[in-house]
Image: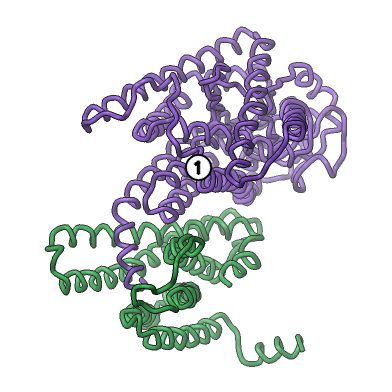
Chain colours: A purple, B green
Amino acid sequence: MITFMNNSDSEEEPCNERTSLMSAESPPVPSYQDGLQASEAGEAQAHRKRRAGGSGNPNNLADGERPDSGVPVRGSTSENEEEELTLKYGAKHVIMLFVPVTLCMIVVVATIKSVRFYTEKNGQLIYTPFSEDTPSVGQRLLNSVLNTIIMISVIVVMTVFLVLLYKYRCYKFIHGWLILSSLMLLFLFTYIYLGEVLKTYNVAMDYPTLFLVIWNFGAVGMICIHWKGPLQLQQAYLIMISALMALVFIKYLPEWSAWVILGAISIYDLMAVLCPKGPLRMLVETAQERNEPIFPALIYSSAMIWTVGMAKPDTASRGPSQQRWDAAEHGRGNHRSPSHEDSQMSEPGPVPTRPISSLEELEEEERGVKLGLGDFIFYSVLVGKAAATASGDWNTTLACFVAILIGLCLTLLLLAVFKKALPALPISITFGLVFYFSTDNLVRPFMDTLASHQLYI
Amino acid sequence: PALGLFLFTIARDPLRIIILIAGAFFWLVSLLLSSLIWFIAVKASDPQDEPLQKGLLIFGVMFSVLLQEAFRFLYYKLLRKAIEGLVALSEDGCSPISIQQMAYVAGVGFGLMSGAFSMINLLADALGPGTVGIHGDSQLYFLTSAFMTMVLIFLHTFWGILFFHGCEHRRWWEITAVVVMHLAVSGSTFCNPFYVGSLVPSYLLMAAAAAWAYSLSGGSTQNLRRFFLCKS
């Protein structure tokens, strides 16, 4: 889901939480789009991979939001201007999301291409118990469908669980869960990843150095994600985490299951965010009612809001904020700033103080869009799988990449139009899947023949 | 060079990046459809028949060129609608990006995508061990491929400008000229590996297209002279 959300500290849960894009707009802004897909925290088991659900934040062009809210402060702004601002900033926000998604995909593809470990089949998750090494096609198909059903039901259960916890205000539990999952992700998976990369490039590293490196990386990551930190660093960590998670998925999901799961997840995403009884929608609405930011740990936000009484122009926003928020509007103003708070630490403390203390001091916030981490992860899984298994290699990967970006564009456009939380997965994943299969089977022989004769079209 | 173009002129403005990616997407879709047609044709025909396969390939190439131009036209239509929307939303009544800039960016998008698809597998293989042309093919394979790709990317850029200009002013002969040029360039690659036959005409055509596009965009020899004199 893409939303403009306040940065709620949501901890990264090992469960798959899919956050939808949400636009966390302050209440004054009518268009408060929450598209938060709850990321389900996964259990921190050895087999369990944390799937940070990507909640797409409805990328509402924050600007779009503004126009609707008719900021009282800017009484002079006309409706048109606001809308236009929305669209103008719309492009900017799209780019703000393009860059991290691209970076994540690049990291995943680079790793897949170079490190052998992630393309070897070394077993499966317990969530996909059916093997795909069966002799017949029908059996394989059946197995993959069964795997998908199991996986999706696990995700649904996790999401509902999370929503229930949120509803009954068991914040401590959620925070603990998210902290645990991010801990595991940051330390364990980084260790494995680093080990494999070093193995591939035949670089020796002794244990003390390794320990130091991983400890520093993990500790800074925890602080950055769950607490405060420079925006860029936070974004970088979130990207790293998404990439790690995606790599884990690519490794441990059998082939056909992976594709079916991708398809099923987008359908689920669609339903969970748009249906009135969908868990993600309930999560978003509950957060809206309470004027709280939704879990920041699961969301990537593209702008930063500097709160808690610090009015520092240079740190406040990534770019010039367009409008100054009125104190009154800051009730939920913090949501606007697109911060990436994917950190799992949700701070119930800061949340209430934010509106109060930072009202006057709230610097311009750059409105941004929030994209759930699960979206990052699934995009990267798609592209990574394309890179790993396609025989056409780079052409297919490139085609999937462009398809996903276009899907993201379209989703953002819809966000601007509808101004509510939207699921970020369906359109992009559909395009990606279509392009993957068609490029692999249709374009590849064509291009290969052309290249062998050195013909150009 | 195409990457340099991208970095200097497009990467600044987010709107241009979106147009670029959308252009690449349109090219991709056209490629998809054309390869679908070719695939069906190949499957329906006899795989042993060499000349027939070659003929089918040629047919596929031509068809693909036509499809690419058709998609360029569709993209033009889409961009026109988008520009109207942007104008409506803009504060001072004029759009933040002009149709010529869009033409340029669209051309670059098409070019980048086609170049990428042509080159990237080659590049990946070039990293690995091997000898060029060991089976009696030309040893200049990589070099010529690189040059051909570059000329094609530039050509796509210029064609984009010319095409959009032709559509804007309803000059059908411009549009047909672009299509004919594209067909000519693709056709000339049929002479590969007789490289002189394909590279030289392509470069000549590119120079012609460049001059044409430059004059259409409002440049002139005075501008050129001032530009060079300022630098020196």
Return the chain for callout 1: A
- Residue A232 placement, left or right of A157: right
**Relative to residue A277, is residue A133 drawn left or right?**
left
Total marks in image:
1
Q: Position of residue B63 (x, y in %)?
A: 27, 69
Instruction: Say which residue appears at 48% left-offset and 49% top-offset.
Output: A401
- Tell me residue A51's x, y (percent): 54, 26
Q: Circle 1 sits in a helix, a strand or a loop, which is it?
A: helix
**Which residue appears at 40% of the width and 44% of the height?**
A389
A101 in relation to B165, above or below: above
Q: Nearer the viewer, residue A76 or A270?
A: A270
Instruction: Where is residue A132? Give x, y as percent.
Output: 32, 29
Percent across and percent down for residue A325 are 77, 36
Picture layout, residue A69 above or below residue B124: above
Choose between A319 and A373: the one closer to the eye.
A373
Q: Can residue A333 be seen at all in this image of the molecule?
A: no
Name the quadrant containing residue A298.
top right
B183 sits to left or right of A204? left
* Image point (61%, 47%), residue name: A201
Q: Quarter of the image holding residue A181?
A: top right
Q: Is residue A342 in view?
A: yes
Q: Quadrant of the C terminus of chain A?
A: bottom left
Q: Residues within 10 Å of mark 1 (few under 14, many from 20)?
A: some
**Residue identifier under label 1:** A116
Q: Amino acid at mark 1?
A: Arg
